[in-house]
Image (cartoon, rainbow, N blue to C red):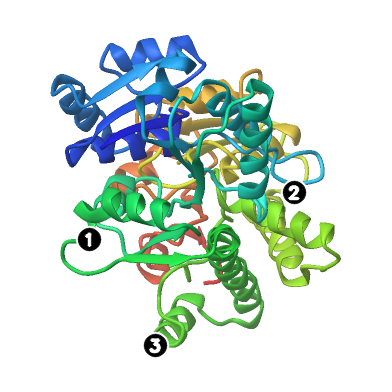
């Protein structure tokens, strides 16, 4: 099939590349000439394991191309994926200006039937607005051309996006006419040869499914963080509690790890958007409002522990920080807990030497001008002359450090572990003062 993907960011690039990998011909559109130039030169604008090689392979095979020409992209694909950003507006609702601009561009240039697929995470009712935008644009042209609007939300985990796309556990498709259903079934046939994975439903249910999934996962994280904080006060060990409740098959182990709070491009934005959707329609989303508040507080949990140890005034204190990205295997700094931790520490007079194996450049960009923050070239050099080590992102390389070398590099053997990387008894037995989450 010939497919156009509008937007070459995280979702668009992964979607387009994976669809090309199974033999389709894909054209990715982006309005940023620098991004398209980078992609044409064989680079990628994001970090995602395995993606760069896959992009290069499919470009070389002639199945994947990139353009800034809107008319060319509309003419190319029988299926038009809209995968542009939907950033939160001032009230927390999703900003649909880029989605609707893409829809109007399709209506402005299409000459034949198109299946228009909302791949961006969008509020319930967006497909109706996309359909209307295309209809109005076609009416302005004075033409009558058929089209279908489909909701096909993505369920990609950053750091494992290729695996998630190529071997999906489910493919949610909101479509309400037979022609669109046939095209989507044909499009996804290569990804479900083992068994049927497509869940067809009405468009609004598909739109809500994406928000519901992310909101549920965010809720589990905030719930465990609140339990961890309580466990600390009560003298219980949240890791043992996690094992105890995770063994219940009704609950399971996924997303039950307490830590420094969730971040990234999806959970914070989607929780806000679902709260805003509820407010718009007269429904107070009380649970999600609490989830968001709990997460905001949890991002500063490590700082609270540091203040309890050293006092509010951290002037003259220097801290090593391991991990900047919101999660491992990505360079994504959007809503990353590390941002709040760094800002809170330097605002109290401290200095910070930070290390991340992938996200340092992106962190330097988003934290540009933050006085007192420097970036180390490796994890051990970040420790030099630091009063304590803070762990904010659970990269695998942090799991088994040389504790003797770590203790020798630090001014004092103190660790504030925001991801519960180590066994408390073991680390304390080595002579460290060890502060974890809920342990």
The residue wearing badge 2 is: 311
Above or below — where is 212 with respect to 29? below
Above or below — where is 235 with respect to 22? below
Above or below — where is 292 with respect to 40? below
Picture quadrant of residue 330: top left
- SS type, badge 3: loop
Q: Residue at x 34, y 18 (%)?
A: 66
Q: Is residue 405 visible?
A: yes
Instruction: State the image coordinates of residue 39 (x, y, percent, origin top left).
Output: 33, 18
- SS type, badge 1: loop
The residue wearing badge 3 is: 249
The residue wearing badge 1 is: 192
Question: Farthest residue in the left direction?
Answer: 61
Q: Residue at x 35, y 43 (%)?
A: 329
In the depicted view, which residue is nearer to us: 242 or 31? Answer: 31
Instruction: State the image coordinates of residue 169 (x, y, percent, origin top left).
Output: 32, 65
Above or below — where is 184 with respect to 438? above
Q: Is residue 400 visible?
A: no
Sort mark 3 into few (<14), some (14-19) or many (20+) by Cα contacts within 10 Å.
few
- Residues marked 3 and 2 touching at CB (< 8 Å): no
């Amino acid at each position: 099939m010939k497919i156009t993907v509008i937007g070459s960011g995280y979702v668009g690039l992964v979607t387009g590349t994976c669809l090309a990998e199974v033999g389709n011909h894909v054209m990715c559109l982006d309005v940023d000439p620098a991004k398209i130039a980078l992609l044409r030169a064989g680079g990628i604008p994001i970090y995602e394991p395995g993606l760069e090689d896959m992009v290069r392979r499919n470009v070389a095979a002639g199945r994947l191309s990139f353009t800034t020409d809107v008319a060319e992209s509309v003419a190319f694909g029988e299926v038009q994926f809209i995968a542009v950003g939907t950033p939160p507006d001032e009230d927390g609702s999703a900003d649909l200006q880029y989605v609707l601009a893409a829809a109007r561009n399709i209506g402005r240039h299409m000459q034949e039937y198109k299946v228009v697929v909302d791949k961006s995470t969008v509020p319930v009712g967006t497909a109706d607005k996309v359909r209307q935008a295309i209809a109005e644009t076609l009416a302005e042209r004075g033409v009558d051309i058929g089209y279908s609007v489909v909701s096909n939300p993505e369920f990609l985990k950053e750091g494992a996006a290729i695996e998630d796309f190529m071997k999906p556990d489910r493919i949610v498709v909101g479509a309400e006419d037979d022609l669109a259903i046939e095209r989507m079934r044909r499009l996804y046939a290569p990804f479900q040869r083992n068994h049927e994975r497509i869940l067809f439903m009405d468009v609004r249910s598909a739109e809500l499914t994406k928000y519901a999934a992310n909101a549920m996962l965010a809720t589990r994280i905030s719930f465990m963080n609140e339990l961890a904080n309580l466990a600390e006060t009560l003298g219980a060990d949240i890791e043992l509690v996690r094992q105890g409740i995770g063994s219940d098959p009704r609950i399971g182990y996924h997303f039950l790890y307490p830590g420094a709070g969730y971040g990234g491009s999806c959970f914070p934005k989607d929780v806000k958007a679902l709260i805003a959707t509820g407010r718009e329609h007269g429904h107070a989303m009380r649970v999600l409002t609490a989830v968001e508040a709990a997460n905001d507080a949890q991002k500063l949990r490590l700082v609270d522990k540091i203040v309890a140890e050293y006092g509010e005034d951290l002037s003259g204190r220097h801290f090593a920080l391991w991990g900047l990205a919101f999660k491992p295997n990505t360079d994504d700094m959007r809503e990353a807990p590390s941002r709040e931790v760094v800002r809170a520490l330097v605002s109290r007079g401290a200095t910070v030497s930070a290390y991340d194996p992938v996200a340092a450049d992106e962190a330097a960009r988003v934290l540009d001008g933050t006085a007192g923050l420097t970036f180390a070239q490796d994890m051990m050099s970040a420790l030099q002359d630091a009063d304590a080590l803070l762990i904010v992102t659970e990269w695998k390389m942090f799991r088994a450090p040389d504790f003797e070398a770590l203790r020798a590099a630090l001014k004092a053997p103190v660790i504030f572990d925001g991801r519960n990387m180590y066994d408390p008894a073991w680390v304390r037995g080595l002579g460290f003062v060890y502060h974890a989450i809920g342990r």
